[in-house]
Image (spheres, rainbow, N blue to C red):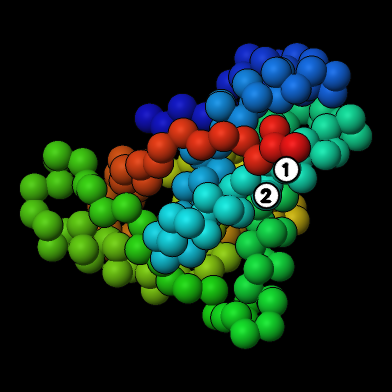
């Protein structure tokens, strides 16, 4: 069974974000806690472009850092707030001139290491092809729910949708993937490996 974010995690974030308004060190803790998750959010959506993913991840935290004193805790995980910034950054990036239109965001290859219980490679390939056939919006919601283990409430916040709309989207997507029994194993796709980098918000 997939474990969703617990309220204790949100409480920890609330304490850290409050301290981070006055303490750079506390914000660094948030960076260490969520940098890889934000990086992977971009990595999945930029065709495994590590330099670009790193740059967008750093920009996400830089914006969050600059606005840390204005941040208001609304009961969501801080990751939800970061992914909202990340989502907007990604849309802006693809809207820039000489870039791929936002309507044509790439169908990206997620990391491709599958759980040991997937005994035949073609089964994983069939599942991945099915996921690739989904729209960008449906893939994003699916990945947030299964791979990043985000609750529906937080997904709705990031995507600018109602909770019922997210639930309906997930239900329809699951029906599309009904012939692929390994849907739950999406959470076992490996994340991108990255070296720890100095937070850009610390640069003078």
* Residue in the image at 56% along x and 26% along y: 33
User: 10 Å neighbourhood of mark 1: few (<14), some, or many (≥20)?
Assistant: some
Q: Position of residue 102 (x, y in %)?
A: 63, 76
Q: Position of residue 52 (x, y in %)?
A: 52, 59
Q: Position of residue 93 (x, y in %)?
A: 65, 68
- Residue 41 vs residue 97: left or right? left
Direction right: furthest residue: 70
Q: Position of residue 31 (x, y in %)?
A: 61, 30
Rounded to the nearest angstrom, the CA distance separating label 1 from label 2 is 5 Å
Secondary structure of the residue carrying tag 1 is: helix
* Residue in the image at 23% along x and 48% along y: 113
Q: Quadrant of the C terminus?
A: top right
- Residue 75 vs residue 33: left or right? right
Secondary structure of the residue carrying tag 2 is: helix
Q: Label 1: which residue?
A: 62
> Nearest the camera: 46 or 126?
46
Residue 105 image-quadrant placement? bottom right
Residue 153 image-quadrant placement? top right
For residue 59, which numbered disc appears in the image?
Answer: 2
* Residue in the image at 44% along x and 55% along y: 50
**Residue 21 sits above or below residue 136 on the image:** above
């Amino acid at each position: 069974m997939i474990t969703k974010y617990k309220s204790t995690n949100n409480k920890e974030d609330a304490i850290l974000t409050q301290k981070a308004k006055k303490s750079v060190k506390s914000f660094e803790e948030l960076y260490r806690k969520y940098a890889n998750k934000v990086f992977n959010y971009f990595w999945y959506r930029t065709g495994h472009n590590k330099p670009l993913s790193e740059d967008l991840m750093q920009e996400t935290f830089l914006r969050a850092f600059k606005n840390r004193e204005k941040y208001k805790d609304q009961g969501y995980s801080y990751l939800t707030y970061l992914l909202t910034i990340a989502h907007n950054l990604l849309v802006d990036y693809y809207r820039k001139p000489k870039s791929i239109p936002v309507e044509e965001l790439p169908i990206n290859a997620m990391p491709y290491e599958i759980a040991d219980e997937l005994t035949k490679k073609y089964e994983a390939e069939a599942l991945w092809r099915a996921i690739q056939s989904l729209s960008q919006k449906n893939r994003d919601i699916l990945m947030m729910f299964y791979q990043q283990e985000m609750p529906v409430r937080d997904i709705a916040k990031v995507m600018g949708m109602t909770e019922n709309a997210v639930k309906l989207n997930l239900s329809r997507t699951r029906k599309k993937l009904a012939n692929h029994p390994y849907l739950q194993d999406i959470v076992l796709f490996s994340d991108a490996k990255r070296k720890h980098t100095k937070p850009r918000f610390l640069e003078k």
